[in-house]
Image: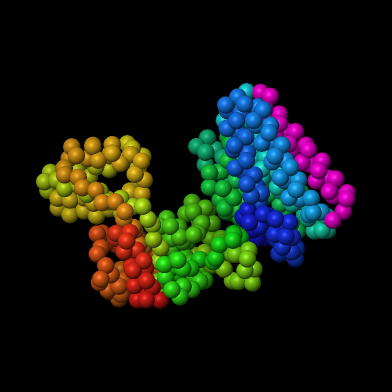
Amino acid sequence: MKVLKFGETSIGSVERIKEMVQLIRNQAKIVVVFPAMPGVADALKDISEYLYKKNPDGANELINQLEQQIANHISSLYEADSFRSKASALLERQFGEIRSYTNDLFTLFEERALTAQGVLISTQLIQLYLEEQNINSVLLPALEFMRTDKNAEPDPQYIKEKLTQLIETYPEVAVFVTQGSICRNAYGEVDNLELGGDYSASLIGVALRAEEIQIWSDVDTMLNNDPMYVKQTSPVRNLHYEEAAELAYFGAKILHPVCILPARLNHIPVRLLNINRQDALGTVISGQMDKGSIKAIAAKDNITMIRIKSGRMLLAYGFLRKVFEIFERYRTAIDLIVTSEVTVSVTIDNQKRLTEIVDELKKYGTVTIDNEMTIVCVVGDLKWNNVGFESQIINAFKNIPVHIISYGGSDYNVSFLIKSIDKKDALQALSDALF
């Protein structure tokens, strides 16, 4: 069995839905994960804002607009009058439930249930179209099997048991449709998976021991560099799980590292595919490592470097703990760290609490700030015994000022901190040297 997750673009128009259905028509045993239709999630959030402000009239006006928008979207999707009537009845029923939230107290619990209606509506409409197209399919409501525990973490045992039971109920069915993003929490309330449909697909793939998880989007397959800055980019066909996680963290258009984690722990490959290029091979993320190979370059902008210089560091213990506790207190993550005998330099990408952090750091030493920085990272099999790659990478920076070099924390990444104005030259120089 395979798990396929589609993005909003795949159901953004009648033509797109028909293309997507043709793609899955001849698949054998798949679970297809869908989001809400484009714009629907944002509209439901706007409706929630009106309800929080106790303005049901404003909310009802937006509800009417959204209902008409979806009705227009699907008016030409169904071929038979009987299915158009079913779709209209479905919309009337779901929007009746949405309107019910305008009559009572509106809290976070109601908001979660309300915003979940977007993906519930889209999957029911798609399932109805599959039925009209004589595709052997069934809708599996995510709220019946996707659950989080008291720590708001997915409950894999529960997901596996419930999902397996549901699928075994339909032994002859080839296509199972379900919702991404939504779940129930440990208390049975409607809730959301923070990382969205990609995370849902990964959890479903693990629960079913899928042979592959496919993530279909409208972006190009993973490239070895950003085509906005570098000439002659090329697709990356294979990535190790760790390489993918490094690239995602440093800004590449790829899955969030947490979404990859369940698949990595269970050795399930994840394939990234472009709905606009259905014949392309895509990028496969798996446990396979191409020995001695450099795969890609990524860059992360809006970085701030903080340098703390203090004589107290010399031959002292406990100094770094005091520094890092400040960042922990203000919930600010650190990207890169380098130290010398009397200096610590760190980088952050969240400047929200920068003023408070700097004020406290001044208790321990002289603090200097550098803004408008960029982290450039090179990702691949960069283990210490793969000699030669260090000189290639560093030589590419011979004409570019570098503030920090970070290597050794990971076998898959070498990172450089540079001024953002040097980003384009740095990426092109690395691309020329490595690819």
Residue 370 in the figure: left or right of residue 245: left
Q: Would residue 38 be counted in the magenta stretch?
A: no
Q: Which residues are magenta?
A: 79-104
- Residue depicted at 52% across the width and 53% down the height: 259
Residue 42 locus on image (x, y percent): 60, 42
Q: Is residue 354 visible?
A: yes
Residue 230 locus on image (x, y percent): 42, 70
- Tell me which secondary structure the magenta stretch mostly adopts: helix
Q: Which of these two is toward me, 337 or 36?
A: 36
- Residue depicted at 59% across the width and 50% down the height: 197
Residue 181 versus residue 107 in the image, above or below: below
Residue 221 versus residue 184 in the image, above or below: below
Residue 50 in the figure: left or right of residue 296: right
- Residue depicted at 43% across the width and 73% down the height: 231
How many numbered marks appear? 0
Residue 217 locus on image (x, y percent): 59, 59
Residue 97 locus on image (x, y percent): 72, 33
Q: Which of these two is toward me, 82 or 171?
A: 82
